[in-house]
Amino acid sequence: MKIGELARRTGVSVRALRYYQEQGLLAPTRDANGYRCFAASDVSRVATIQLLFSTGMRSSCVIEALPCMTGATDDAAPALVKNLLVVRERLVSDIQHRTRSLAVLERVLASAIPDSGPAPVFEGGYDDCIVRTTTPRTALPSK
């Protein structure tokens, strides 16, 4: 498939796909006319690249992590492991912060909507946040 089709299928801009190629994250073949040709498997590869970038990883780290995620290797370099641990700690901290923020928001909503019932109870840590509600939320009143 051409780069425009890959962009359409993945929701990633053509410019970003060219950047991924420049960084060595994608390796399309070339047609006789010089157009890039991507494989169907590049759709999932782009999704994986997007996922890794969403963690805040730099492209150099993504390049190292991709083979581990795609099953090309089980051997991660010690420097990669160190970088991944830093990324994980940052994500854990962000999730904990967002979980606390959500709990505050739910308490505010519970007091702003008198008939909405008790606020949800959050249990567990970042990896097993469970939200229980006893009454479904109603819409906010119109002003």
Image: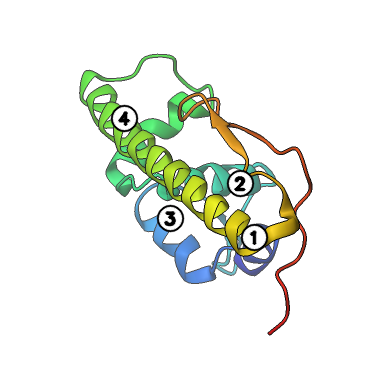
For label 2, the residue is: 42
Is tag 4's residue or tag 2's residue first in the polypeptide sequence? Answer: 2
Is tag 3's residue or tag 4's residue first in the polypeptide sequence? Answer: 3
Disc 3/disc 4 C-alpha distance (Å)? 23 Å
Q: Position of residue 128 (x, y in %)?
A: 55, 25
Q: Mark 4 belongs to which amino acid? A: Leu
Q: Position of residue 66 (x, y in %)?
A: 44, 34
Residue placed furthest toward the top: 74
For label 1, the residue is: 6
For label 3, the residue is: 21
Q: Is residue 73 left or right of residue 88?
A: right
Tell me the crowding category of disc 2: few under 14, some 14 to 19, or many 20 or more residues within 10 angstroms, Cα based. some
Is tag 3's residue or tag 2's residue first in the polypeptide sequence? Answer: 3
Q: How many marks?
A: 4
Q: Quadrant of residue 81?
A: top left
Q: Give the label on residue 71, or none.
A: none
Instruction: Say if mark 3 contacts mark 4, CB within 8 Å.
Output: no
Instruction: Say if mark 2 contacts mark 1, CB within 8 Å.
Output: yes
SS for callout 2: helix
Is tag 1's residue or tag 3's residue first in the polypeptide sequence? Answer: 1
Q: 128 or 120: which is nearer to us? A: 120
Is tag 2's residue or tag 1's residue first in the polypeptide sequence? Answer: 1
Tell me the crowding category of disc 3: few under 14, some 14 to 19, or many 20 or more residues within 10 angstroms, Cα based. few
Disc 3/disc 2 C-alpha distance (Å)? 11 Å
Residue at image point 62% right, 54% down: 110
Tell me the crowding category of disc 1: few under 14, some 14 to 19, or many 20 or more residues within 10 angstroms, Cα based. many
Disc 2/disc 1 C-alpha distance (Å)? 8 Å
For label 4, the residue is: 84
